[in-house]
Image (cartoon, rainbow, N blue to C red):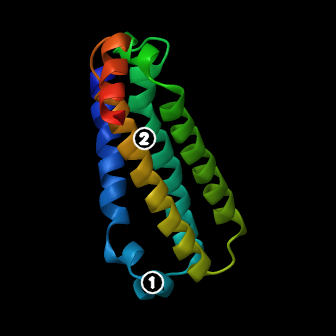
């Protein structure tokens, strides 16, 4: 299977997971609590693993060793990377909390926090991946925004 085909397949899995997670079963507390704790835990675990991996795969392609955009990889500032690292640490803590949750209410709150973290990760990642230009040009753009 080619890299492009595997990327498409993985993208479809992530989109399916997102669509599942946006169903009332996960967005409304009453609907969520009607389902067994064991089933909810398994679904949230699945989603958390798929999403965290899925969110980082494109970013790694952009910033990694064999980067699509080597200039962006070089120009990505410490602050952007620190934001991403902080978000990943928060996601790790929430994923650990899934293991210690004892009720559907706790699981519901955890998955709400994970939702927020995933949204922030997507925003930061997209912002970084959409950067274009040389490190010098990017620095000028940053300086212009800061003034």
Tell me the quarter of the image containing the N terminus: top left
- Residue 26, image x, y percentages: 41, 73
Q: How many marks on residues? A: 2
Say if residue 1 shows up in the picture: no
Q: Nearer the viewer, residue 140 or 41?
A: 140
Figure quadrant of the C terminus: top left
Dot placed on the residue nearer the N-terminal end, 2 or 1: 1
Q: Considering the numbered disc 2 on the image, is that residue within a helix, a strand or a loop?
A: helix
**Residue at figure coordinates x 51%, y 60% from the top left:** 114
**Left or right: 23 in relation to 75:** left
The crowding category of the residue bearing disc 2, from other C-alpha atoms within 10 Å (few below 14, some 14 to 19, many at least 20), is some
Q: Give me the C-alpha separation between circle 2 and circle 1.
A: 26 Å
Query: Which residue was labeled with disc 1?
Result: 29
Residue 72 lies, in percent from the top left, at: 37, 18
Q: Is residue 121 left or right of residue 138?
A: right
Residue 104 seen in the figure: yes
* SS of the residue under disc 1: helix
* Mark number, residue 54: 2
Q: Is residue 72 above or below residue 20?
A: above
């Amino acid at each position: 299977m080619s890299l492009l085909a595997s990327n498409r397949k993985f993208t479809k899995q992530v989109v399916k997971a997102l669509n599942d997670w946006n169903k009332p079963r996960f967005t409304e507390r009453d609907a969520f609590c009607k389902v067994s704790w064991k089933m909810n835990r398994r679904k949230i675990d699945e989603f958390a693993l798929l999403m965290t991996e899925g969110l980082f795969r494109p970013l790694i392609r952009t910033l990694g060793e064999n980067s699509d955009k080597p200039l962006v990889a070089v120009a990505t500032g410490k602050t952007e990377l620190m934001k991403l690292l902080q978000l990943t640490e928060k996601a790790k803590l929430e994923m650990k909390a899934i293991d210690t949750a004892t009720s559907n209410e706790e699981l519901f709150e955890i998955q709400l926090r994970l939702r927020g973290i995933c949204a922030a990760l997507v925003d930061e990642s997209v912002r970084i991946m959409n950067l274009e230009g040389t490190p010098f040009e990017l620095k000028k753009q940053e300086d212009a925004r800061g003034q």
